[in-house]
Amino acid sequence: MASHDDILNKVMAHYTVDTSTIEEENRILKETVANMKEELSKFHRTPLLVAEVKDMIEKNALLKLNNGNEFFVEVASACEPLYPGDTVLVEQKSLTVVKKIDAQRKFNVEKFVIVEKPEVAWSEIGGLTKQAEEIREVIELPLKKPELFKKIGIQPPKGILLYGPPGTGKTLLAKAVATATNSTFIEIVGSELVQKFIGEGSKLVKEIFELARKKAPSIIFIDEIDAIAATRIEIGTSGEREVQRTFMQLLAEIDGFKPLGNVKIVGCTNRRDILDVAITRPGRLDRLIRIDAPNEEGIKEIFKIHSKYMKIEKGTEIDRLVKQMKGFSGAEIRASCTEAGYFAIRDNRTTIKQKDFLRAIVKVKEEIKEDGEDYLNMFG
């Protein structure tokens, strides 16, 4: 029978073996943890991709990269809570979200819009007396005399919508009211906003309005507004969704302005019929002003404006020329005057004759006809 000392020695030996095994396992585990920490730290090292969180679905994120691609990815457990719109850093291979950052892309807005202080006097606009008066009441008066509206107790529109055929003077009217109020004129082209800034349209709209506040008093002129504010029955493609996001941002920015603020919005379109009613409802661009081709008296006014510096031969029948230009827009009347000048230059003359104007009118009519045929051919 084993003595008490023998049993104790065996137990001690077994304990020593188990301790050594545990220590070895502990060492291996420590090395494993260290390796994992090292591997994890690699994910936090540069270069990392910058992405935007589009949506959070449970513990995962729907990301959009700068190239427009979207991915459904995992979020690192150490990352703080994320929300749609956040900017994050992601690992390049797995696109795992590593951390949230405050940096957001900022545009140099003035590179993408036309910002100017126009010098267009009301006297330079012909055939649009009624429309000019309405614009002055809605845009110019509130900017110049806001206290008048406060005393009366009414709120002027935040903006207006100019609609009608191309070349009828919509941009010119907007520039004239900017000149009259000494406002900064910020021009955006809706179609370019859609084509050039896929994935960034809503951000650019936001920053354009920030620029307008910074440079106030200012007038934001949105040409071809139908490109982003047209009625859409279905939102299927990613491009259509982006246009919708841009449109919603535009509405949000308009809603954020005070009626008696020093920023006004002027929308412009040739296609009022396709506009979403949300843009023209009360409180937004709720004053609609139609700009038509000028009548005979208007044509005469516009002709005099564009020909006032021209040396016209005595005896020229202005009324006859006006009748020949029936249906012309302001831009086409101006083109006729320019072409007449070229006919005189080709004959080495400084005086413009009636025949020069008549030939110019015929040429402009032919160009109108060709443009119309090209349009019809384009759409079958």
Image (cartoon, rainbow, N blue to C red):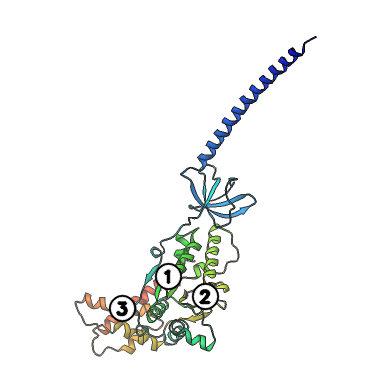
How many other residues sit within 10 Å of disc 3, few (<14), some (14-19) or many (≥20)?
many
Question: Could you tell me how far apart the alpha carbons at marks 3 and 1 are, in whole angstroms?
Answer: 45 Å
Q: Is residue 298 left or right of residue 241?
A: left
How many other residues sit within 10 Å of disc 1, few (<14), some (14-19) or many (≥20)?
few
How many other residues sit within 10 Å of disc 2, few (<14), some (14-19) or many (≥20)?
some
The amino acid type of the residue labelled 2 equals Arg
Percent across and percent down for residue 75 are 59, 47
Q: Is residue 252 left or right of residue 127?
A: right
For the point 39% across and 89% down, the residue is 297
The residue at the far top in this view is 1
Q: Secondary structure at mark 3?
A: helix
Percent across and percent down for residue 242 are 53, 60
Percent across and percent down for residue 154 are 54, 85
Q: Which mark is residue 272?
A: 2
Q: Which mark is residue 214?
A: 1
The amino acid type of the residue labelled 3 equals Ala
Q: Earlier in the sequence, mark 2 or mark 1?
A: 1
Q: Secondary structure at mark 2?
A: helix
Given residues 170 and 338, the one toward you in this image is: 170
Given residues 23 and 184, the one toward you in this image is: 23
For the point 58% across and 34% down, the residue is 33
Q: Are marks 2 and 1 in contact (CB under 8 Å)?
A: no
* Quadrant in the rendering for residue 36: top right
